[in-house]
Amino acid sequence: MPVFETADRPRLAYTHRQGSSPTLVFLPGYASDMSGTKAVALDAWAAEQGRSMLRFDYSGCGESEGAFEDGTLATWRDDALTLIDAVTSGPLLLVGSSMGGWIGLMAAEARPERIAAFVGIAAAPDFTDWGFSADEKMKLLAECRLERPSDYGAPLVTTRAFWQSGEANRMLHREIAIDCPVRLLHGQRDPDVPWHHSTHLAGQLRSADVQTILIKDGDHRLSRPQDLDLLIGTVASLLR
């Protein structure tokens, strides 16, 4: 697997396939990586269609170098922008899952001239604000680290540095300066990111071409076969 190296950052693992434009870019969620079900399924479809696609691991995640607990929202945003700038050219279609949706929104604002479309899957901007109780926030500030149980494996660790980075990059209190077509997919049985956050996000986006697609029996992952079909169909509709 190729890695991207710079003098002052951890090496980033990625896979990039050349093909027709726009390049699909998958942005994983918190403590996830490019080998997740949605990323792999989308890449397999893109390969069949001859589409260019970039998948990668944030620093400290998956096959990339670094320690997970050294990562912050801004660090991982910069990882995404570094690889986008270094290995892709031309228009981009960003697909962001959960926290990856937040990073994708920041990347879209940072590179507006390159973004052809954006797809959010249970996109979770500002989750450092609404996703933690007052007691948890106080524990983070006092102890610099918080562990919470996870339905997906080992306990999830959040650091004070990550939380502070998230609070410094909140988006939902303002107009989000994105003008491309946007599609927001969200399961209404999502226990981690309540679906109404996507309807709120839709209202904050400057683009007039925004659709929120709610899956009544969908969970947070949206990785069932029918969910993957919906994701691929949504991406395909934006490429016509």
Image (cartoon, grey):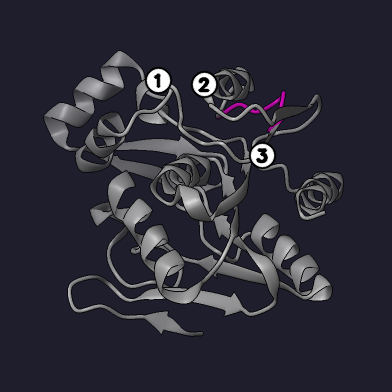
Which quadrant is home to the C terminus? Answer: bottom right
Residue with the most extreme bottom position: 1
The Cα–Cα distance between marks 1 and 2, rounded to whole angstroms, is: 7 Å
Mark 3 lies on residue: 181
Q: Amino acid at mark 3?
A: Pro
Q: Amino acid at mark 1?
A: Arg
The answer to whether marks 2 and 3 mark residues whose Cβ atoms lie closer than 8 Å is no
Residue with the most extreme front position: 113
Q: Tell me which numbered mark, 1 or 2, is placed earlier along the sequence.
A: 1
Residue with the most extreme left position: 142
Residues rendered magenta in the picture: 186-192
Residue 124 x, y percent position in the rendering: 50, 33
The image quadrant of residue 194 is: top right
Residue 85 x, y percent position in the rendering: 41, 67
The answer to whether marks 1 and 3 mark residues whose Cβ atoms lie closer than 8 Å is no
Q: Nearer the viewer, residue 170 or 222?
A: 170
Q: Which mark is residue 174?
A: 1
Residue visible at 65% across and 60% down in the picture: 39
The answer to whether marks 1 and 2 mark residues whose Cβ atoms lie closer than 8 Å is yes
Does dot 2 land on a helix, a strand or a loop? helix
- Graded by Cα atoms within 10 Å as few (under 14), some (14 to 19) or many (20 or more), the crowding at tag 2 reads some
Relative side of 21 to 4, left or right? right
Membership of 190 in magenta stretch: yes
Residue visible at 34% across and 44% down in the picture: 157
Does dot 1 land on a helix, a strand or a loop? loop
Majority SS type along the magenta span: loop
Q: Nearer the viewer, residue 223 or 165?
A: 165
Q: Tell me which numbered mark, 1 or 3, is placed earlier along the sequence.
A: 1
Residue 72 visible from this viewpoint: no
Residue 60 x, y percent position in the rendering: 34, 63
Residue visible at 39% across and 35% down in the picture: 148
Mark 2 lies on residue: 204
